[in-house]
Image (cartoon, rainbow, N blue to C red):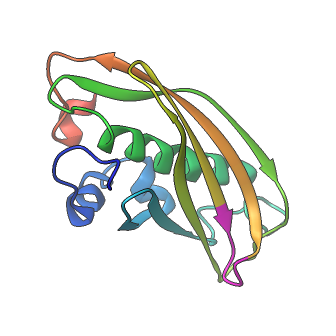
Amino acid sequence: MSIWIGDVNVQEMNEKNKACLNENLGIEITEVTPGSLKGRMPVDKRTIQPAGVLHGGASVAFAETLASWAGYLAIDRTKCHAVGQEINANHIRPAFVGTWIYGEATPASIGRRSHVWEVRITNDEGKLVCISRCTLAIIDVPGQYTTADQRG
């Protein structure tokens, strides 16, 4: 049984990722399973720190992107929106330029007014790079943003 509400379209999500931070970091949604959302992000000049390894902030942005998309897909999008409220991350090992990191968001709790999502980020070898937990507030919204221009 799927946790998602309504239609889920990976191509549409990736189109909406354009003209914002997600595109700037190279974040892609790759798969939606019945119980998780998956994505990937390159480790390149956009996502590294001066020491040449994945920047922890890029990992956090990637984790929050996956958690926020997952929360958004698990609500009635005609009435509500999911927004980040809190995030934490434990950085386990470095990731290096020329590789990809992969994330999977799974629900720890899906409530009526808040969600908690766990995001596990791994490297090309499947080893844990970062683990994050993101709390989302589910808010009532009279309308939705549909284009980059409307996002402000």
Left or right: residue 21 versus residue 103 is left
Where 80 falls versus 151 (above or below)?
A: above
Q: Where is residue 66 shown, x and y percent of the image?
A: 48, 51
Quarter residue 12 falls in: bottom left
Total labels: the figure holds 0
Q: What stretch is highlighted in magenta?
A: 121-126
Q: Where is residue 131 shown, x and y percent of the image?
A: 72, 52
Q: Where is residue 54 shown, x and y percent of the image?
A: 73, 63
Viewer-side residue, 105 vs 20: 105
Q: Where is residue 141 shown, x and y percent of the image?
A: 23, 17
User: Which quadrant is the C terminus positioned in?
Assistant: top left
Where 98 falls versus 44 (above or below)?
A: below
| 32 in the magenta segment | no
Is the magenta region chiefly helix, strand or loop?
Answer: loop
Q: Which residue is drawn at 78% across and 67% down?
A: 53
Q: Which residue is drawn at 25% across and 51% down?
A: 16
Q: Residue at x 80, y 48 (%)?
A: 90
Q: Which residue is drawn at 63% across and 61% down?
A: 47
Viewer-side residue, 142 vs 57: 142
